[in-house]
Image (cartoon, rainbow, N blue to C red):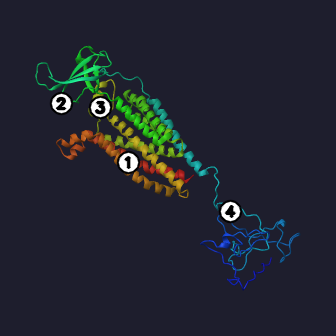
Amino acid sequence: MPPPPPVPRDPSAPDGGRPAAPRTGGRRRAEDRHPGASGGHRLPGGEPARHRARHAPAPRRPAPVENRPGSAPAGGAAADPADGAETGPIPHPGHPGGWGDCPGQADLGATPGPPAPPAPGRGHGHGHGAASPAGRRVRRLLVALLVPCVLATLAGVALLWPGATPVPEIPPTQQVHGTVTAVQVADCSPGAGDRRCTGVTVALSDGPRAGRDLVQLVPNEPSTPRFAVGDPVTLSWSGANPDDAGSYQLVDFQRGAPLGWLAAAFALAVVVLGRLRGFAALVGLALSFVVLLWFVLPAILSGGSPLAVAVTGACLIMFVVLYLTHGFTARTSCAVLGTLASLALIGVLGYLFTVTSRLTGLDDTTATLIGTLGPGVPIDPRGLVLAGLVIGALGALDDVTVTQASAVWELGAANPELGVRELFAAGMRIGRDHVASAVNTLVLAYAGAALPLLLLFTVAAGGVTQVLTSQDVATEIVRTLVGSIGLVAAVPVTTGLAALVVGRR
């Protein structure tokens, strides 16, 4: 069909009647924003011509019109839309290409047809449909990785479940309680006249002498505590003659009440700040103690491998606490997988360096435990070092992995256009700061726990090398460094998993 006649110019117009050139950017003119308000054309029927808009579908070229029954002859009026011919923007002079919307210009002879559907993969949609297939595949991958770990943990619990608790060769002493009613200087032995001891009178509140007083002699030495009237104390009774003062020994103070108030203040602070999630964290903490007291400790005393028991118990605590506190979500699953990978690395490195460093684990506490249990209960001292390393690092690992997964999720929510690489890079920037502070926290925690030991070796004869390579200090060094390596490894593993899940949603 022949092209439409050109639009006549109006010499009286400010621009000489020239057709408006298509705009390529910048703010829209008044006729772009409000067609017809400043000279824009209007279609027949009063409808303003539509101009470029955001997310507009791509225009369709008009199909060639053939002469067939019911159609208008070539060069005549516009065809009736009912005859099946497509209508659309018509090229006109001054518009290169002739197929885009041109501000201020419209076909005055064609009836607008229905808008064409947007091309696949273009435009912007606001629908909230089902997750993409890639997101479903990633979640299936998480399930495929987690299910074997859960089954292995349950199998380990079943195989390592503690049997009968062994009876120690040295019978345990019974604890009795009382209150100090009098304190006075006394001789360590009758008639010695040295006045180097303190006579402490205790009113017993339970035990075989409940309601009666008992006098205990305590030597005045720097290594013995100082008692005052009104102090609640604890005594150990050997089980011998209850009327013999030699059957008792004043051992410690009662600390139940202040510790209870401190625990209540801690729980209140957690619930006030964390609310429901804080309450769930407290429940998870209680369950962690249940696992330790009912599974880990009895299983080790029953002869189980301390490392195997510690790894199994740590995995059980991790699954219960993380999912209970943070919910059954893909975010929590990423944190769980990152923690599992780091625990495995800590176990391997800990075993390797305790063997190569020849750490025996025979410190004073372990030696006392072995002597109390006797030869009938085999205890692996080196295994106890490894078990303490794994369990001690679990808390810091949970902190790092949960924080990293949450950071990547928040980054993806703030900018949904970020891909996997961008999310990983941004998450690693956060993780580097977190690792720096977490490693410092772990080192200071171990240093604080071993502070008396460090002071002892500081004043002892020998150089720094001799102090650092001694059995007790070297054990703490291995614990610190292996745990720190596990923390460092947890950051890229957790960040990568979280970025993969968020980027493929």
> Distance from label 1 to label 4 (Cα)?
50 Å
Q: Earlier in the sequence, mark 4 or mark 3?
A: 4
The nearer-to-camera label among 4 and 2 is 2
Q: Where is residue 376 in the image (x, y as percent from the top left)?
A: 33, 23
On the question of residue 470 being in view, the answer is: no
> Distance from label 4 to label 2 (Cα)?
90 Å
The nearer-to-camera label among 2 and 1 is 2
Residue 285 picture quarter = top left
Q: What secondary structure is marked by label 2?
A: loop
| Mark 4 lies on residue | 119
Given contact means CB atoms under 8 Å apart, are the residues at marks 4 and 2 in contact?
no
Q: What secondary structure is marked by label 4?
A: loop
> Distance from label 2 to label 3 (Cα)?
26 Å
Q: What residue type is labelled 2?
A: Glu
Q: Position of residue 106 (x, y in %)?
A: 74, 73
| Mark 3 lies on residue | 366
> Distance from label 4 to label 3 (Cα)?
73 Å
Residue 55 picture quarter = bottom right
| Mark 1 lies on residue | 438
Q: What residue type is labelled 3?
A: Thr
Q: Where is residue 48 in the image (x, y as percent from the top left)?
A: 74, 69
Q: What secondary structure is marked by label 1?
A: helix
| Mark 2 lies on residue | 221
Residue in the image at 34% along x and 35% along y: 383
Q: Earlier in the sequence, mark 4 or mark 2?
A: 4
Q: What residue type is labelled 4?
A: Ala
> Distance from label 2 to label 1 (Cα)?
40 Å
Q: Earlier in the sequence, mark 1 or mark 4?
A: 4
